Amino acid sequence: MSFKSLQDKIDQLGNPAKWLREVQVGAYQYPVKSEYTNWRDEQRSWHDTVGLLDQSLHMTDLYVEGPDTIRLLSEVGVNSFKNYGRNKGKQLICCNQDGYLIGDMVLFGLEDDKVNIVGRPAVANWIEFITSTGNYDVRTERDERSVSNPQQRKTYRFELQGPNAWRLLEKLNGGPIDRPKFFHMTEINLAGHRARALAHSFAGAPGLEFWGPWEEGDEVRAKIVEAGAEFGLKLVGGRAYGTCAVEAGWIPSPLQAIYSGEGMRAYREWLPGNGFEANASLGGSFVSDRIDDYYLTPWDLDYGRLIKFDHDFIGRSALMQMADRPHRRKVTLEWNADDAIAIYASQLHDGENGKFMEMPSAHYAAHPYDSVMQGGRHIGLSTYPCYLSVQRKWISLATIAEAEMGEEVSIIWGEPDGGSSKPGVERHVQREVRATVMGWPYSSAAQDYRSR
């Protein structure tokens, strides 16, 4: 069955809260080699030595340029864009008219009137819609992620993270690098080429993200590998890479709040019927017939502190009304080891098995949502469970109400009624997993970095 638009798919199939659970697309793809050595040592690299993370293929780049660039960003972003411009990074957070999240992407200030917006496609799609239907003097150029793009990418994008990252970067640069402030940009030398770089800490360790023309990527990578040998460099494959965000405390893909409401109808009619949003599979133990129950507010993801009401933007009035209400908060859940072991044991004994927990990332849908319970009450959602070999723990990120730090909650692991029809879901029964509420980021290095 083909669909002209996302709205057409909803019109034909009905309630999206039901058919999104049966979408056959699984977890978000990282189209790089799954392991270069083994994912356990690759996870350890950004803790103990240095890891090279290849971000060249899995993110969408949207370039926006023109006199109205900052006005556009200010009118779609809940955060302020005062004094934003060249050589500054920023997290762009977008909501719908009702104040619920469409998503977030990272902004790279290439010039005062030119930015590159990088991340999963949801926000890039929203901005392209706004520019195509609004009155903005801007030009856009899209460089789509490789799974949806048969063409060569415009740029390579690498990141070096770990305690040895800075020494390796300065060796590659041929001398000292003035360390830019957090989320500020600089330029460095790599294999005889000039690259732009952003200072941040995706994996919670020191380092830089840097990029340049695609044609230079192989040469730059080879030089990094050669120079990195003395620093214990490890190439980080897709399996380990998928755990970085959880350890650092970032929920990468809340379900975009676009599937309901007349205010978003024009956008749904603009979106393709086979695109990212039309295949945004839902998975996990949390099930509701109301698609709105899957929507999140900025406060749910700890973005409430970034909202600035000093400018007019989409969703401003709704967020002002929400501001003084009670909010869920983002936490890390540390899973009980015995309960996790019991799920693995169920695979080895006769009887009903629990949902298999793939290591190191147990994501089997684009948007995994598991119910968090306390005292028999639903108190929130757990998402992106992963295993950290350095800490020897299963953890997940969650947005919850009521429970305090150090308290015990429980996660319902597995889907009801034996599981959905998604290819990554075998027949299973649900299991209850105890978990301890902890802060975020879980990584001690990231905690130190964030405090500074």
Image: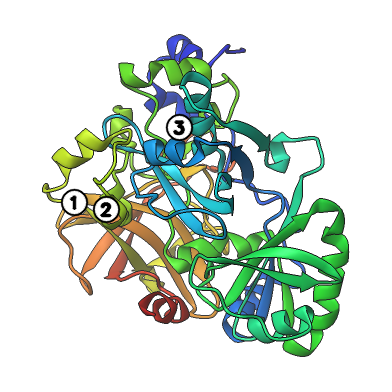
Going from the N terminus, do you reach mark 1 or mark 2 first?
Answer: 2
Tell me whether the residue at label 1 lies in contact with that at label 2, contact meaning CB atoms closer than 8 angstroms: yes
Write down the quadrant of residue 16 in the picture.
top left
Instruction: Identify the residue under disc 3.
Output: 21
Amino acid type, residue under disc 3 in the picture:
Arg
Of the pair 411 and 444, the residue shown nearer to us: 444
Q: Horizontal and vertical percent for residue 139?
A: 61, 31
Which one is closest to the eye, mark 1 or mark 2? 2
Mark 2 to mark 3: distance in Å? 29 Å
Tell me whether the residue at label 2 lies in contact with that at label 3, contact meaning CB atoms closer than 8 angstroms: no
Instruction: Identify the secondary structure beneath mark 2.
Output: helix
Q: Which disc is residue 304 wearing?
A: 2
Is residue 222 toward the left or the right of residue 20 in the image?
right
Amino acid type, residue under disc 2 in the picture:
Gly
Going from the N terminus, do you reach mark 2 or mark 3 first?
Answer: 3
**Which residue shows up at 74% across the image and 64% down it?**
195
**Which residue shows up at 51% across the image and 68% down it?**
387
Q: Is residue 438 above or below residue 274?
A: below
Mark 1 to mark 2: distance in Å? 9 Å
Instruction: Identify the secondary structure beneath mark 3.
Output: helix
Going from the N terminus, do you reach mark 1 or mark 3 first?
Answer: 3
Is residue 306 toward the left or the right of residue 447 in the image?
left
Q: Which disc is residue 327 wearing?
A: 1
Amino acid type, residue under disc 1 in the picture:
His
Is residue 233 toward the left or the right of residue 163 in the image?
right
Q: Is residue 230 above or below residue 340?
A: below
